[in-house]
Image (tube, helix red, strand yellow):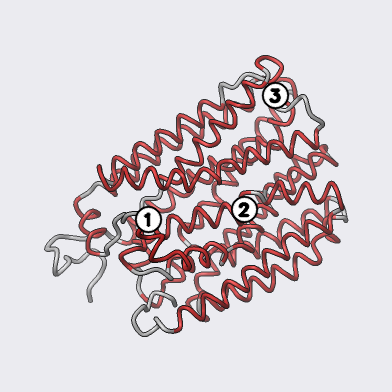
Amino acid sequence: MDTAADKHPESGHTPVRLSDLAIGVIIGRTSEFFDFFVFAIACVLVFPAFVFSFASPVDGTLYAFLVLALGFMARPVGTLIFTEIDRRFGNGVKLTSSLFLLGTSTVAISFLPSYDQEGWLTVASLCLFRMGQGAALGGAWDGISSLLAMNAPEAQRGRYATLPQLGAPLGLMLAAGLFIFLKLSLTDEEFLSFGWRYPFFVAFAINVVALFARLRMVVSEEFETLFSERQLSPGPVLVTLREEWLNIIIGAFTPLATLALFHMVTVFPLGWVNLHAPQNIIGLMWIEIVGACFGLAAIIASGFIADRIGRRSLLTICAVAIAAFAIVSPLILSLGLSGESIYVIVGFTLLGLSFGQSSGAVASGFRLKNRYSASNLTADLSWMFGAGFAPFVALFLTERYGLWMAGAYLLSGALCTLAALTLFRQRQADRRSQDTSWR
């Protein structure tokens, strides 16, 4: 029986094993999500007092969430720039330069002076470095996730689609655990003075390790051949947009409920609790670590469920469940710490089931020759529309109109997802006999 380690009959050499692909995907995504959660947690615990000290705590947190959103807005720009680098100089050069930008931007944040020291220069620097992080993440797309999905056994595609998503709960657990350690080990003055800087140094170190792990794969002869055989090479972005523009738009809105929920159970609760019950913030971070464990298990379970009922059916069911959760979530959150625990654990479970298959759904709707570039652009737009502004919008609406508006915001995302899935289903129907990637 042929295995992934057997010689490829056309290429004449041993192709890359699925286990190698899986390890590369998990390492890369965990490092990216750790970097993201370090910044996101700092938006709650650090930047309102350190960078936006001129504003009230609520406004300072809202300003920090706007800076968080800048990273998602910069991702498509990074994709355009680094795709051109990829086409001219190769994937290895693109990945090295993008992760160098990511590491430089991350470590530069750790050296920021306070607003009291440098005023608006500090604010401008934070915005610039955050945009550098976002542009770098747009260029960090290496195609390994698509390669993994396309080489997975057909009956197990749902399970393999979960592997890139495992990086999210793992990155959250690492980032939250590090901040908990620092908050418990240092006084508030020490934490705001220097303690908060250490997670950014750690993020830089993890990016370096991830860079070498991923470079070892993408620049190898086996990987380059496999990318070529699967037509996973960057095409002209304008051509991709012209041929796939409607699929990209639909694909960007397909995981909207999932990505909105992503921030609604991770970043938004931290901001809301830190403003209204700061004595509970350490407890909530512990709860989020526990919730991430539930999310991790749900991501794994989603693969087995999707292989049985189909990814599209699972995402539809999850969108309906998220809509129901959005309706009752304001009532749950109003119950205090116990309610916050229920909100986080139930939210993470729903998130894991839907997030586990969201990337597979986005990637499966494109022509094979466009899949590399179109998948990257769609992921950028999905995160920008679905997650980029979620913490800001949810906190702004909650502070102005009450918790029920946060639920209404999440409900709108679920409705958008259901509409996109319906349209996606119609467009895929006439291609089903030629394109078997939607399973």
How many residues crowd mark 3 within 10 Å: few (<14), some (14–19), many (20+)? some
**In the displayed structure, does residue 151 sit left or right of residue 135?**
left
Is there CB contact under 8 Å for labels 1 and 3?
Answer: no
Element carrying mark 3? helix
- Viewer-nearest of discs 2 and 1: 1
The span from disc 2 to disc 3 (Cα, nearest Å) is 27 Å
**Residue, x 53% and y 37% (percent of image)?**
131
Q: Which residue is mark 2?
A: 387
**In the displayed structure, does residue 309 sit left or right of residue 407?**
left
**Residue, x 71% and y 34% (percent of image)?**
45
The span from disc 2 to disc 1 (Cα, nearest Å) is 25 Å
Which quarter shows the C terminus?
A: bottom left
Q: Which residue is mark 1?
A: 238
Element carrying mark 1? helix
Q: Which residue is mark 3?
A: 192
Q: Position of residue 248 (x, y in %)?
A: 47, 63
The span from disc 1 to disc 3 (Cα, nearest Å) is 45 Å
In the current view of this chain or complex, which residue is farthest to the left? 12
Task: Please report whichever mark, 2 or 3, sits nearer to the chain's N-terminal start.
Answer: 3
In the rendered image, the vertical position of residue 27 relative to residue 93, given as above or below: below
Quarter of the image for residue 145 reads bottom left
Kind of residue at disc 3? Leu
Element carrying mark 2? helix
Kind of residue at disc 2? Ala
Q: Position of residue 371 (x, y in %)?
A: 36, 63
Q: Nearer the viewer, residue 433 or 351?
A: 433
Task: Please report whichever mark, 2 or 1, sits nearer to the chain's N-terminal start.
Answer: 1
